[in-house]
Amino acid sequence: MLSFIPFLILIVLITCCIAVFGSATLDGASQVSLLVASAVSVLIGHFSKRLEWENLEKEISDKIASCTPAIIILLLIGAIGGTWMVAGIVPTMIYYGMQIIQPEVFLVSSSVLCALVSLMIGSSWTTVATIGLALMGIGKAHGFDDGWIAGSIITGAYFGDKLSPLSDTTVLASSVSGTPLFTHIRYMLYTTVPTFFISLTIFLIAGFTMNVSGQGNVHEFMEGLQHTFVISPWLLLVPVLTGVMIARRWPSMVVLFMAILLAVVVALLVQSDLVLRIAGEDGQGLLASYKGMMRVCYGSTDIDTGNAVLNELVHTSGMSGMMPTIWLIICAQTFGGALTATGQLQDLMRLILHFARGTASLVASTVGTACFCNIAMADQYLSIMLSSSMFRDTYRQRGYEPQLLSRSCEDGATVTSVLVPWNTCGLTQSTVLGVATLTYLPYCFFNYLSPLMSIFVASFGWKIKRTCS
């Protein structure tokens, strides 16, 4: 019973924070809430189980250290947001996209486009940080609400990420459960494809029934972009080269760094006047250009396009804009480390296993555990690994093939991570898109229908085989 106390305290504190601070909850209130809940967890573990502080501290430190690559990637994504904007890459994508994509099919088109890109490159984060930013601009120009736009982008990005053989979560889920990669992917099609088509249907109906009146915005946006940036299809070579690097399976950090470097070169060659404006009114010469590009990479950049809405869209925060997210990740990992070190998370998991009896209840328990771990551990990788390790023996003892476990873990962990405000995925996507997690959550149909579809399919026993009678 004591294991529930840290979670109850966190839920109460977060609820109060949302009621008091609203969309500003992630600016600091959530971080404090996580640290308070962590302290409670540590105190319970120390006094009830006589755990030494050194062991607790080591577990928490290891948990924070495990998210170091994600923190570096976040910083690089922040720099990409700034450099790709100032270089004119994102404005060019917005400019041509507004002419090609019609408002009625914008939502479904953005989902399909993000799905294709994510499927090819295997990364929802990179998809959202590049093509997703451009689609946010196109959607705003057409007059769509931020939640609908972000929901369509995230739906497509996570569909592709989930089925791509290049995706780290797909490889992780298959490997930790002992399932061949392509067997795992084929088995996921039974739940993933129907869910994606349901989501696309909703977006298609919404696009034709919404009364969006953004035609005026489109023309104003196009004029503002032309007036501020040099718009050229040649600028699209940067995302093409980035896609080539990803397709050749270069490490994520290397790809992101090279994408930043390419954008810096393009900005200095093509958007030199804009770079000097960012450096300062009296800026001239190489030192001024250096100063301008450094500001673009690490700091806040305001660009006057003559249109207030467009100004907000092309505003970037660079690496500094990622600091609140990084702060929250560290606090969330502290909470996850405390729960693991004290054994409180394991206590709760054993309780869940007690109710997993039939096929549907076993799958529901697996999916529910993965979702719960996303909330408690704030990381999709830990959620996949923990839920898989917890249920692996149970699935094997009951004669289920391992792909049922791997699919259930991905249906519960990968797609729901973006729906948790303090999870690394939720934090990243809300920061990159500039849309609060709770704002886009209702429109991420694919992400919260996938776990339900997994349980629904299991309840009918469709394509579920046993290795023994």
Image (cartoon, grey):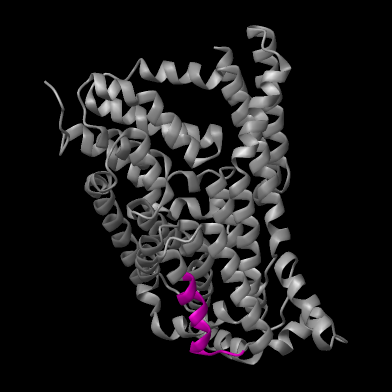
Residue found at x 70% / y 39%: 31
The answer to whether 166 is drawn above or below residue 92 in the figure is above
Question: As rendered, which of 439 and 7 lies closer to the eye?
Answer: 7
Q: Nearer the viewer, residue 401 or 17?
A: 401
Can residue 3 be seen? yes
Q: Position of residue 312 (x, y in %)?
A: 66, 72
Outermost residue, left side: 469
Report whether residue 12 is seen.
Answer: no
Please state if 196 lies on the left or on the right of 459 as rendered: right
How many numbered marks have been drawn onto this rendered protein structure?
0
Q: Quadrant of residue 452?
A: top left
**Residue at the image point whose x is 53% and y is 40% from the top:** 379
Residue 177 in the image: state x and y as whole percent: 33, 33
The residue under the point 62% across, 83% down is: 266
Magenta-highlighted residues: 230-242
Q: Does the magenta run of residues contain 233?
A: yes
In the picture, the quarter occupied by the C terminus is top left
Determine if the magenta segment contains residue 85: no
In the rendering, at what x and y percent does residue 237 appear?
A: 49, 81
Give above or below for 26 relative to 47. below
Q: Position of residue 460 (x, y in %)?
A: 16, 34
Name the quadrant of the N terminus.
top right
Q: Is residue 318 above or below residue 453?
A: below
Which residue occupies 37% across, 35% down? 176
In the rendered structure, the answer to whether residue 452 lies left or right of residue 123 reads left
